């Protein structure tokens, strides 16, 4: 048999290769196959949004533009969710999609990763959803203006449970005018979100709502049905309840300025302390002036203090409004975090001239730049104070005590043919009522003498 020479062999190889499908090597680059890593199992409360985490998955960086993440879902029986509930599924940005579970149970997800050429094996992760342990919140809606013999409807449909549990409604008649014979039994549909009551005389009917998630009961919310003849009943507004944390002022200020009377009558205020934490000796006497719209209250131990405000227009007292201020122990306080912002770089030139072989240079100009400490924060939400400093005194500040300030470096002398560099450390200190934290930023000012 005749042997093949090198040219013939090359020709046969070329023919054989040309018969195969051409691979677009500019699109897909052969490399290690992707590996899907779906992240660790999670336990979450019903009603919260869940984020999956497949960011630890690996793939060839040369094919990064072609990578897609595909999640499939096995939901618990009774759930209406499927993969369409996941954000950005089957895309490059689906490495950490999120969803909101609709029932309790185990949601199992399987992640696969493709690089346009090869698809990984599936990796599972389990999200266990439980009812959680947070109490529901009652909301009885707005006060009503009623009339004798006509039904007034209250609306508690804004009540909610943090874990999304179905609520049970319990309405009660807390107070009624002396002329009324009504009791809680006269509230129609008292087990639903929108009950009605038919007032039997003029005055204020005070109605409370408590909701239950089957495990916990909410704090009561109070609404009123105002039934008046020529005089309209005033409305008390004790302000918003606040969690003051461990940095609460003492005394704290109450604020009833939101109270009003539709007839424009001058109001009389009456504040009272209705609940104090265990161990407290506080009473109404701790309120600086219970007849003031904005009295101060001096507290003695940490915990929650609840206050009731009633207002009087000279004819009728309002329904009460309640506000609660919570004060935490100093041991629960977290330190703030300082962030002095990005480093600053300034380059300036001084113009130099020569006369009789001697160089004379103008100064490099002064520079003003912004320093931004607004990235500082307190984990507890406490107010924080700011202090800027620079130890050499080269940098002056427009305001040493604000989150944002302008720093200024004065004009600096230039020398022909040389560069002078100032590297200055600016420090920001932030403080809450108990702790401080510091951060630094560097300001580099460069001055070069050049011929004009």
Image: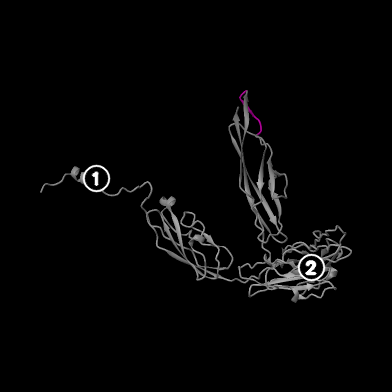
Q: Residue at x 66, y 69 (%)?
A: 136
Q: Does residue 362 show up magenta in the picture?
A: yes
| Secondary structure category for the residue under label 1 | helix
Q: Is residue 125 left or right of residue 294?
A: left
Q: Residue at x 77, y 72 (%)?
A: 276
**Which comes before the other along the chain, label 1 or label 2?**
1
Residue linked to disc 1: 14
Q: Does residue 77 show up magenta in the picture?
A: no
Q: Is residue 430 above or below residue 145?
A: above
Residue linked to disc 2: 307
Q: Return the residue found at the far right.
A: 314
Q: Which residues are magenta?
A: 356-363
Q: Is residue 435 visible?
A: yes
Q: Is residue 405 above or below residue 153?
A: above
Tell me whether the residue at label 1 lies in contact with that at label 2, contact meaning CB atoms closer than 8 angstroms.
no
Q: Is residue 369 above or below residue 253?
A: above
Where residue 344 appears, as percent x and y from the top left, is 62, 44
Q: Residue at x 10, y 49 (%)?
A: 1
114 and 389: which one is in front?
A: 114
Q: Is residue 125 left or right of residue 447?
A: left
Where residue 239 appears, as percent x and y from the top left, is 77, 61
Q: Is residue 300 visible?
A: no
Q: Quadrant of residue 368?
A: top right
């Amino acid at each position: 048999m005749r042997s093949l020479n090198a040219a013939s062999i090359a020709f046969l190889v070329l023919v054989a290769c040309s018969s195969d499908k051409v691979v677009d090597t500019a699109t897909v680059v052969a490399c290690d196959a992707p590996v899907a890593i779906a992240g660790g199992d999670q336990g979450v409360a019903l009603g919260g949004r869940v984020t999956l985490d497949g960011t630890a998955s690996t793939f060839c960086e040369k094919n990064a533009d072609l990578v897609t993440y595909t999640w499939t879902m096995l939901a618990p029986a009774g759930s209406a969710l499927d993969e369409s509930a996941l954000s950005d599924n089957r895309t490059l940005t689906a490495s950490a999609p999120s969803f909101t579970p609709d029932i309790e149970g185990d949601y199992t997800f399987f992640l696969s990763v493709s690089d346009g050429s090869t698809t990984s094996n599936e990796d599972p992760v389990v999200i266990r959803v439980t009812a959680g342990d947070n109490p529901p919140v009652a909301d009885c809606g707005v006060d009503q203006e009623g009339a004798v013999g006509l039904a007034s409807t209250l609306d508690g449909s804004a009540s909610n449970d943090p874990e999304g549990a179905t609520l049970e409604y319990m309405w009660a008649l807390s107070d009624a005018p002396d002329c009324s014979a009504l009791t809680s039994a006269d509230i129609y549909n008292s087990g639903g979100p929108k009950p009605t009551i038919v007032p039997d005389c003029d005055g204020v009917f005070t109605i409370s709502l408590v909701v239950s998630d089957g495990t916990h009961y909410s704090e009561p919310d109070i609404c009123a049905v105002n039934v008046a003849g020529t005089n309209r009943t005033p409305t008390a507004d004790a302000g918003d309840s606040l969690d003051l944390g461990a940095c609460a002022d003492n005394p704290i200020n109450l604020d009833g300025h939101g109270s009003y009377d539709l007839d424009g009558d001058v109001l009389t205020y009456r504040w009272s302390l209705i609940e104090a934490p265990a161990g407290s000796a506080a009473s109404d006497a701790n309120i600086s002036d219970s007849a003031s719209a904005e009295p101060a209250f001096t507290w003695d131990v940490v915990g929650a203090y609840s206050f009731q405000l009633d207002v009087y227009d000279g004819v009728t007292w309002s329904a009460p409004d309640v506000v609660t201020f919570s004060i935490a122990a100093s041991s629960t306080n977290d330190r703030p975090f300082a962030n002095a912002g990005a480093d600053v770089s300034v380059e300036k030139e001084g113009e130099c001239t020569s006369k009789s072989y001697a160089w004379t240079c103008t100064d490099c100009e002064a520079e003003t730049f912004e320093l931004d400490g607004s990235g500082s924060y307190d984990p507890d939400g406490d107010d924080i104070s700011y202090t800027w400093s620079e130890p050499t005194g080269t940098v002056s500040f427009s305001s040493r005590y604000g989150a944002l300030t302008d720093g200024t470096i004065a004009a600096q002398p230039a020398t022909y043919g040389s560069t002078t560099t100032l590297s200055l450390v600016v420090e920001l200190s932030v403080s809450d009522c108990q702790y401080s934290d510091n951060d630094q930023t560097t300001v580099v000012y460069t001055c070069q003498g050049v011929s004009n």
